[in-house]
Amino acid sequence: MDRDHAWTLLNEYTKSASLIRHGLSVEAAMRFYARKFGEDEELWGLTGLLHDFDYERFAEPPAHTREGAKILRDMNVNEEVIGAILSHADWNLDDYPRDRPIRKTLFAVDELCGFLHAAAAVRPSGFDGMKAKSVRKKLKTKSFAAAVSRADITAGAEMLNLELDEHIENCIEAVAAIDG
């Protein structure tokens, strides 16, 4: 599957502008880390773009990710992409552990990208000038973007062997490049 086909699939299954934006943000962060780690940028980008493509139709666990995996397998999508998508959901960890760089990275960027958009939305300058320090301050405010798992964000940075500030800065750089 190439990027154009993945984009078409995402838009076929996803109508929410914010969920499409999330897919684009996670794609950008995955591409950033693929370059950083010397991995396949196209493969990692597809993983990020498609990781939640089935969410609107199959939001309830474990259908979310598993139904999408069936669709992707029917399209002969690379099993590395499918396994990474499955691994980002806790209910699939027995069969798809976060034991590979692509899987760890998808988990690490998913919640953080969502949080960064929430933080940018309340800043007059959006992503412009956003720093890890201000994001960490927002992370401490439990009522802000309350649905975002702070534990997952911290665990994600640890999985990548990065300090939290560095991980935040990396994701800001990646997402700001496409979202401004």
Image: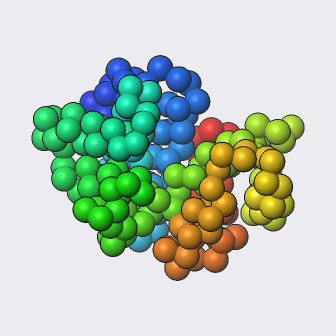
Q: How many marks?
A: 0
Residue 48 at x, y = what percent?
Answer: 41, 47
Q: Nearer the viewer, residue 145 or 40?
A: 145
Q: Is 73 displayed left or right of 59 in the figure?
A: left
Residue 108 at x, y = what percent?
Answer: 51, 62
Residue 127, by quadrant, is top right
Residue 110 at x, y = what percent?
Answer: 52, 52
* Residue 109, placed above or below residue 160: above
- Residue 170 seen anywhere in this rendered image of the structure: no
Q: Is 148 displayed left or right of 132 in the figure?
A: left
Q: Nearer the viewer, residue 97 or 160?
A: 97
* Residue 99, placed above or below residue 70: below
Residue shown at the point (49%, 39%) measured from the top left = 24
Quarter of the image that includes the N terminus = top left
Q: Is 108 displayed left or right of 7 in the figure?
A: right
Residue shown at the point (33%, 72%) measured from the top left = 99
- Residue 147 seen anywhere in this rendered image of the structure: yes
* Residue 48, placed above or below residue 95: above
Residue shown at the point (20%, 38%) measured from the top left = 70
